[in-house]
Image: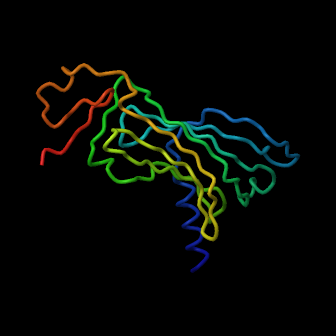
Amino acid sequence: MKKWLVLTAALCLAACGKETDKIGEASTVFNVLGKNDRIEVEAFDDPDVRGVSCFLSYAKKGGLKETVNLEEDASDASVSCVQTAPMVEYNENAVAKPRKVFKRNASFAFKSLQIVRYYDAKRKAFAYLVYSDKIVQGSPKNSLSAFSCAGAPAINPQVVQNQPNKQIHGGCIVEVSTK
């Protein structure tokens, strides 16, 4: 029974973070058997903030252990999130609480790499934190990227005309609760 639980947990972790686009990779260590150690670069769109995409780079251990899925990747990762559409739109209620927007396993079952999005309502800004955790001992290594509506190109107010639940803040259209 325990084997099935571990296998199920591993499959669930492996399934997370698959809605990414691989951008490229850079080899860091040559391995005779299996893939080289490398840095992989991927991109994904924030599911709640239309018009913002994040680019993630992370260390990937190669070699024979990767071939049989027993490698443990280093806790080194970086994230950068940018505006990738003419307008950024989001619902303030949907982004108010921190949300895990990315997760990928970094070992067979006990270590994961994740990105959590935080919203700063006062500044109409987002912070994206990438870090790794492990059941026994995580790592303090982390990277942060921030995106501000104030820094985005301004939007014409006519875009939200006759829509009282939408406001413009710099380059963002923010849907707010009318309660």
Position in image of residue 18 (x %, y %): 53, 46
Say left or right for 91 vs 158: right
State which quadrant residue 161 falls in: top left
Give the x, y percent position of residue 107: 66, 59
Q: Vertically, is 52 above or below 60?
A: above
Which residue is pictured at 13% across the width and 44% down the height?
178
Could you say which is closer to the camera, residue 95 or residue 104?
Answer: 95
Q: Position of residue 163 (x, y in %)?
A: 14, 31
Please say if 154 is above or below 165.
Answer: above
Furthest-front residue in view? Answer: 122
Q: In the rendered view, does 174 fall on the left or right side of 44?
A: left
Q: Residue reaching furthest bottom?
A: 1
**Quarter of the image where the N terminus is located:** bottom right
Relative to residue 135, is residue 59 drawn left or right?
right
- The correct choice, above or below, for 135 with respect to 124 in the image is below
Give the residue displayed 59% in from the left and 71% down from the top: 6
Question: Front-most of 141 and 11?
Answer: 141
Query: What's the residue at 44%, 27% (across, down)?
Result: 84
Q: What percent of the width, then of the height, locates residue 146?
A: 47, 38
